[in-house]
Image (cartoon, rainbow, N blue to C red):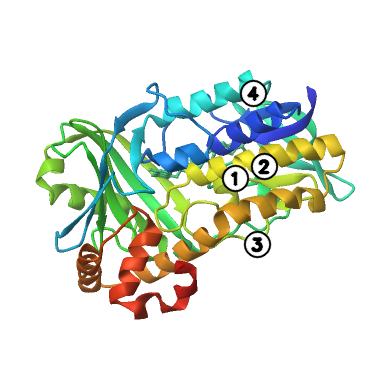
Amino acid sequence: MALDYDIVVVGAGPAGSLTAKHAAVAGANVLILEKRPEVGSPVRCGEGLDKNGLARMGIKPDKKWIANEVKGAHIYAPNGRCLELKEGMAGNEVGYVIKRDIFDKELAKDAIRAGADIMIRASAIEVIKKEGAIAGVKAKHMGERFEVSAKIVVGADGFESQVGRWAGIDTTVKPKDIYTCFQYDMVGVDIDSDYSDFFLGSCAPGGYAWAFPKGKHRANVGLGLQVTKIKGKGEPKRYLDAFVKARKGLSKGTPIAHIAGAVSVCAPIEKTVGNGILLVGDAARQIDPMTGGGIVNSGIAAQIAGKVAAESIQAKDYSTEFLSRYEKGWRKELEDKLYRNWLAKEKLTSLSDDTINKIIEAIAEYDIERISVLELLKAVKAKYPELVKEFEDLLM
Ligand SMILES: Cc1cc2nc3c(=O)[nH]c(=O)nc-3n(C[C@H](O)[C@H](O)[C@H](O)COP(=O)(O)OP(=O)(O)OC[C@H]3O[C@@H](n4cnc5c(N)ncnc54)[C@H](O)[C@@H]3O)c2cc1C
């Protein structure tokens, strides 16, 4: 089997489906390859999504995939002090707990409605190189090998991305910039379903723990640990079990699913385009290094990726120079925040429980106007300027 498309997108996560949709809307002939037998499943996500972010992805909320709407966030210090951030504050970075499997399927359907084709159980195994450019992919579908010729290959293949590496783009992430995550989908928990909860400190070394309510007695309860702080196999589960056991409302619950995965929490990488190739979403390391949330950034970058890829097809110019319009576009939208939040993450991972307690106390005293990492950092700066002095200029 040999196929021929303008654009082949590897991966049908939010990054891939949205890139495909925007490229197809702009007139390109697009194929999505997805290696899993079902788009969006199994879910590997805490399923937290903020309202403003959703709007920036160009997506309207839909009750089909909204499991719960929250009114704000609780941030817990190691000593139990709780900082309450309410929805009334502008710039809300919390909002919905979604059903990721349905969300991803809806995005794939949107791409198909826009004219894109999709093949599931189709795994890209290599890129095709011709005269110094990427010219398609070799793939496997149910054991059968085939080739897709394409003017542009989009690597939207997630955290474990190989497309970038095959094409010679360095997407390596240092172990200190990786969180290993473990999560339970729990039923029978007794928590406030109006708030997403975040827990800082030694309950999740180098990262944080979360409880995102999916309904009255159901929640995604998980944690992310900095890989360099993990001493042995099975440690993320041990930390999660200890975390759950120590909290009355959670320990009443029962896990009905175990979810393991990883996220990159690195500074922006140097390059996400090449001749005939671009990377988007987790494959391009566009995940927020402070929160580990990547859905929104994937969606923002994907809109630009789809548009630029389609323009490149129209212009018959698939060169690095042309595709750099995508690189410039996503960096303009995301790079400062990614860099600032990476510096903040670097700092947070070095702090003791005692210092984190003090910081939460300082933030509680500060009159926060918005729920955002930037606003929290400004509050830290007011009391402990030395903690943020290396990146003070990014807090404007
Ligand atoms: C435990 C955990 C909790 C998280 N919680 C949140 C959260 O609450 N909120 C948030 O915003 N983000 C969260 N994230 C991050 C979020 O899941 C990702 O940022 C998001 O999925 C990125 O979308 P993507 O399309 O780039 O990649 P993905 O969603 O990973 O999609 C990549 C797709 O590519 C496919 N693929 C891979 N290789 C190939 C190949 N060779 N051929 C064909 N297909 C291929 C995969 O099967 C997959 O479907 C979490 C991540 C983890 C691990």
Q: Within 10 Å of the Cα at label 4, are there few (<14), some (14-19), or many (20+) other Cα atoms?
A: many
Q: Distance between the residues labelled 1 and 3?
A: 15 Å
Q: Where residue 43 appears, x then y in whole percent?
A: 41, 33
The residue at label 1 has a CB less than 8 Å from ligand 1: no
- Secondary structure of the residue carrying tag 2 is helix
Q: Where residue 190 appears, x then y in whole percent?
A: 13, 37
Report the residue at 74% width, 52% height from top.
324
Q: Where residue 206 appears, x then y in whole percent?
A: 34, 63
Residue 336 occupies which quadrant of the picture?
bottom right
Q: Distance between the residues labelled 4 and 2?
A: 18 Å
Residue 204 appears left or right of 286: left
Circle 2/circle 1 CB separation < 8 Å: yes
Q: Disc 1 residue type?
A: Ala
Q: Distance between the residues labelled 1 and 4?
A: 21 Å
- Secondary structure of the residue carrying tag 3 is loop
- Secondary structure of the residue carrying tag 4 is strand
Q: How far apart are marks 2 and 1 (CA)?
A: 6 Å
User: Is residue 156 in view?
Assistant: no
The numbered mark, 1 or 3, whose residue comes first in the sequence reads 3
The numbered mark, 2 or 3, whose residue comes first in the sequence reads 3
Report the residue at 36% width, 41% height from top.
46
Q: Disc 3 residue type?
A: Glu
Residue placed under numbered mark 1 in the picture? 301
Picture disc at residue 267: none
Residue 44 or 138: which is nearer the viewer? 44
Residue placed under numbered mark 3 in the picture? 270
Picture disc at residue 305: 2
Report the residue at 61% width, 60% height from top.
269
Q: Within 10 Å of the Cα at label 2, are there few (<14), some (14-19), or many (20+) other Cα atoms?
A: many
